[in-house]
Structure formats: C-alpha cells, structure tokens
Amino acid sequence: MNSRNVFRALAGAIRFNGTKLNRSQWYSSRKCHSNSKNESGQTNSGQLSYVQRMKMLQNLREKTGMTEEVIRNGKCLLYFKGDPLLTDDFEIAWMDFADLCVEPKLFLENALLLGMTDAGQFQFAVQIAGFGPELKQAVINKSQGNFTDFRLSLMMMSTSESALASKAKAIFNWHRRNTHCAKCGSPSARNSTASCRTCHKCEEVWYPSLSPVGIVLVADSLKTKLLLVRQGRHPKGMYSCIAGYVDSGETLEEGIRREVAEEVGLTVLSVDYKASQHWSFPTSNLMIGCHAIVSGNEALDVDTSELEDARWFTVEEVRRSLNAIKSNPLETMSSVKEGTNNFFVPPRGTLAHALIDSWLINN
C-alpha cells in the first residue's frame, strides 16, 4: 500500500464505519536535530541562528513588509479551500512563487508570512482558491503531491511541518472571521505579512489571538491506573485525556481542577505542567498539557452531556494500547471496528499521545 493509499485508509478509519485496513509497517517518527552554535550565534554549518532568524522576521513584520523581491526568493506552502499541498510522503510540497504564475499583488492579498528556514529563506503560506481553476491541477502535476485533508494530515506530518501547517490554517481562519473592527465596526485591512489588521476608521490594530485549553492525563495516587475519556466526535474506540477551555480569571491549575470535577466528579490533588501544542480545531487554541493526581477512591460521576464515556484503565492496558498505536495505528483502529480490540489511545501528532507517552516513561 503506497503512502497516499495509507492516508485514504486512515481517513476511512476515522470517518467511516466498516472500513477494513491493513498496514504492516508505519512511518517512524522523524526527529529534529539542532546544530551546535559558536559564540557569535552562527551555527557551525554556516546557517542562521534562531535569534538571527527571529530578528529578520520581526523586521519584515514590523518595518519593511513583504516586497516583490522578498516573495520571489521565498518558498510557499499552498492551500486550497483549507487543505495543504503535501507530497505522497506527507511532507509539505514547497513551491516557488514563479510556479504560481500570478501577479505579486494578488499573491500578497492571499498570502501570509509563515517563517524562515535555517538558511535564511522566507516561508509563506498562500490560499490559491481565487487564482483560477487551472492552477490547482497545475501545481498538483508539478509537485506530484495532492491537497490533503488538513485534520488527518497533522497525524502524518513531521512535528515541525505540522506546526507550520497548523499556524497557517489558524491565521487564515482568523482573518476570514475578523474582517471588521471589534471596537467601532468599520472594515479593517490586513498588513502585508498578515500578522495584524488595522481599522480603516479608528486605526485600532488587531492581532490574531488564541484560546488556552487545559488538557490533562489523570492518574490515581498509587499510579496503578489512568483515567481516559471519550467524546461522541472521537473515532470509534478512541479514549483520550480530559480537556477544556480555561475560563477568564482562572489559572491553568484552577481550570483543570474545575474540568475534572465537572466532567468526571473527581477531586484533583496536584497538577504538573508538561508540554504545550498549538491546535487549530475548532479555532486557534493553545493546548496546555498536564499530569494530575486524584485519590482514586471517589466514584466517577460522568457528565454525559459532555462525554460519551469515562473509565479507569490499568497502566498495562494503556501501555499496550500506546505501543500498538505507535507501531501500527491503522491496524489498531481497524481492530476496534472489527471487535477484536476495545479501545485505543490517540495517535502521534496529538498532545494527548505525548502526555500518555511521557507518563508511562517516567512512572
């Protein structure tokens, strides 16, 4: 089964019932390696340091803006109706500005500044739906890739590239939903890098925002079992971590304690922050991942308006599920549909997966 068919199978596993999947191997996680730096901040390979790249991006956003010269020398992540252009190996199919055959003005109206490579090349994301019907097929042919369902692609891409794709999606969505000033109601206009919008009338400047979401893996005080939950929108058989928005005026710890109390009726004894992840569903969210401890003696009181189910799993049950989803997610998800397995944990690419993995490694 080639990689494109793997993706179609994965889409079927998540979206449709009765799909039978087979996959003997799975892509290994791609690891990022950083170059060592000398005293000046330049890497030994001659590439730009992180600080140098951030300064150059700041200058472009706040001072010079995106010029024709800048975009001609950059590389582009293309979107068509919200889906990114990826290769058959689920890597970004980067394209040059020249490949698009569009005027710089039209490009700038539909593009945003995404980042910069270690070598100093600017990266852009651009929506091409308004560039004409012929361009979509032309870039598919040139890249030998395809515009891929966004949500599913995040599970297949490397961590670094999925972060870029998620960032672009969130910023595009923010501009689409915020065409008018929230202060006076007048139309607003985006700047050339799409980093902000300015009101035509009152000149108020608005920046893309995100919402904090606490996501927590709950364990009992003896660390013999883990609490996992499922919502109706989850793929069949998938159990994940409790998650919810942090309310205005709350700390992260208070938000997590409240969510656990509301959704499963348990009292959190301690909360430890572990990691974070940007997540662009349903809007632009900052997922803040934690581990939490409860006594384990309280009975579950599940809020069925929020959750379809919540249950305790032994550590070994979760470990087996994690190992299975790591080695062959398609077969693992398929086995739930076929009745030979009763649950699976979220696949890689999700913060829930990372929280479960790190807990098992350290306990």
Image (tube, rainbow, N blue to C red):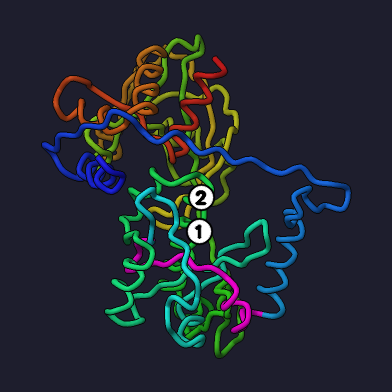
Above or below, 336 relative to 108: above
Whether residues under marks 1 and 2 lie with C-beta atoms below 8 angstroms apart, the answer is yes
Residue at 14% across, 26% down: 338
The residue tagged 2 is: 278
Q: Which mark is residue 189?
A: none
Kindly indicate the quadrant of the structure image that contains residue 288: top right
Quarter of the image with the N terminus is top left
Give the residue furthest to the bottom: 201
Residue at 37% across, 68% down: 142
| Residue 361 horizontal side relative to residue 117, left or right | left
| Residue 38 horizontal side relative to residue 103, left or right | right
Kindly indicate the quadrant of the structure image that contains residue 203: bottom right
Asked whether 200 or 58 is in front, the reply is 58
Please state the horizontal and vertical placement of residue 337, each as a whole percent of the image.
Answer: 16, 30
Please state the horizontal and vertical placement of residue 328, each as a whole percent of the image.
Answer: 32, 28
Asked whether 102 or 66 is in front, the reply is 102
Asked whether 329 or 264 is in front, the reply is 329
Magenta region, residue range? 65-84
Specify whether residue 272 is painted magenta: no
Please state the horizontal and vertical placement of residue 255, each as a whole percent of the image.
Answer: 51, 39
| Residue 298 horizontal side relative to residue 122, left or right | left
Q: CA distance from mark 1 to mark 2?
A: 8 Å
